[in-house]
Image: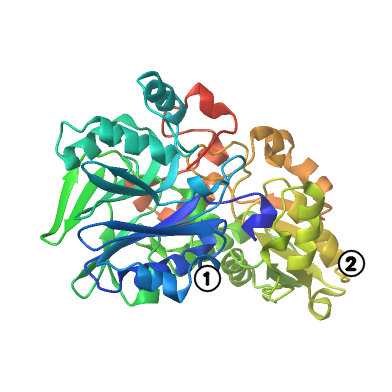
Amino acid sequence: MLAEIKGLNEECGIFGVWGHQDSAQLTYYGLHALQHRGQEGAGIVTTDGEQLKLAKGHGLINEVFSENQLEDLSGHASIGHVRYATAGDGGYENIQPLHFRSQTGGLALAHNGNLVNAQALKNQLEAQGSILQTTSDTEVVAHLIKRARHLPLEQAIMEALSMIKGAYAFLVMTEDRMFVANDPRGLRPLSLGHLGESWVVSSETCAFDVIGAEYDREIDPGELLIISDEGIESKRFSAPIQRTLCSMEYVYFSRPDSNLDGKNVHASRKRMGKSLAEEAPVDADVVTGVPDSSISAAIGYAEASGIPYELGLIKNRYVGRTFIQPSQELREQGVKMKLSAVRGIVEGKKVVMVDDSIVRGTTSRRIVKMLKEAGAKEVHVRIASPPIQNPCYYGIDTSNSGELIAANNSVEEIEEQIGADSLAFLSVQGLNDSIYQGEESLKHGGCMACFTGNYPTEIYPNTMHPYEKA
């Protein structure tokens, strides 16, 4: 479902290019492919080898950048960022990339993720005399880098990365180098590709396809890449730890045409749907998915169950961001404006409605009601992920546990609240097997903390409640 009406939002997407005369234009197109990861603001920083140039603003990519602005962003390298602003985090100063100037040169940073020890580090930095200009976790890293100014820059960056904890995929750029880093557990996705002789980095591989770049590999957990005109160099700032890529990337956030950890997202979602059909069969006439992220799972459910898949719900693609509103009342209105039930498909039918997740339950309740108002005889809700019972502290804007419907209600109680004739969720094992398939699950693993409460990192006291995020 649509992030803005579900209360489930990824924090951002990052994209970088090194060694191309049209780096800003390529970054613009790359960020456009990552627009689903953040619609509140965007920015691009370029370098021509002598200075960094920044342009950023609130809104969608095509609202922030004009053709003239892109032409002004001359340079052979660039990094870019799209973001979703959390509460208290919507100021212009928080839009990334963040750009810092000093006597030793410029520094630009773009970050996807969240640092669980950010507040502790902020307190420490301020006690030592640092003045923070934003509420972003990303600024903390810039201060840590600059405080290690006695070290060569790459070592200063590695020193800073060793001090931060949580989820992060970083792009750091100076006038003559680009640094790429992924946290020791690889919680957030980050991939490397090339376009001719140029290097390209992206949160998702779908952006490579848009600009015609070829995928090379994922950035390893705990790896730091240094890219310059001399080439590319790989170093480690952390000992290898088993990767725990966020499972919600497969369930909801990533585009279906992206590959994560070598696995296609669409194919993974289809397997989730098939597993769901095996775990929670139902006698019904049609299967429909909630656009867009649930379509793949709905197709998988239909294939496994033998129940025909139909377009029972249609998304209105021409509703502006005016309807992205925080209040409960307007959120419910937003569901109505963005989705329509197809009466000719669902009328008189027993419908299986497949969705990727349930957060507050607001959207599910509205869609079930919408289908029944369109004449559906029964609506059986099937969710292609386990119940979200725990907050995420790694860069996903899930509500606190008090607002998560599955944290405070049984499946039967949720079923009653959303008005479904039946409700079932995919099991944790079913999700794991759908993503990692058989023996691969022994070598790889995903973060499923929002489902299980088993967090892969230490959670600091200040992260137990909503707080400022990158």
Q: Could you tell me which quadrant the N terminus lies in? A: bottom right
Where residue 262 appears, as percent x and y from the top left, is: 34, 61
Where residue 250 appears, as percent x and y from the top left, is: 49, 56
Which of the two labelled residues, at mark 1 and mark 2, occupies the earlier sequence position? Answer: 1
Where residue 304 appears, as percent x and y from the top left, is: 59, 68
- Mark 1 is surrounded, within 10 Å at the Cα level, by few (under 14), some (14 to 19) or many (20 or more) other residues, namely few
Indicate the amino acid at tag 2.
Glu
2 sits left or right of 259 in the view: right
At 71% across and 73% down in the image, what residue appears? 316
At 40% across and 75% down in the image, what residue appears? 210
* Residue 124 in view, yes or no: yes
Indicate the amino acid at tag 1.
Asn
215 sits left or right of 392 in the view: left
Where residue 171 appears, as percent x and y from the top left, is: 32, 51
- Mark 2 is surrounded, within 10 Å at the Cα level, by few (under 14), some (14 to 19) or many (20 or more) other residues, namely some
Residue pointed to by mark 2? 373
* Residue 439 in view, yes or no: no
53 sits left or right of 412 in the view: left
Q: Is mark 1 on a helix, strand or loop?
A: helix
Separation of residues labelled 1 and 2 (CA atoms):
37 Å
Residue 24 appears in which quarter of the rendering?
bottom left
Number of dots carrying numbers: 2
Q: In this view, does 39 lie above or below 466?
A: below
Residue pointed to by mark 1? 62
Front residue (pair 346, 165): 165
Tag 1–tag 2 contact (CB < 8 Å):
no
Nearer the observer, disc 1 or disc 2? 1
Front residue (pair 25, 185): 25
At 57% across and 48% down in the image, what residue appears? 85
- The numbered disc on residue 230 is none
Furthest toward the top, the residue is: 127
Front residue (pair 1, 278): 1
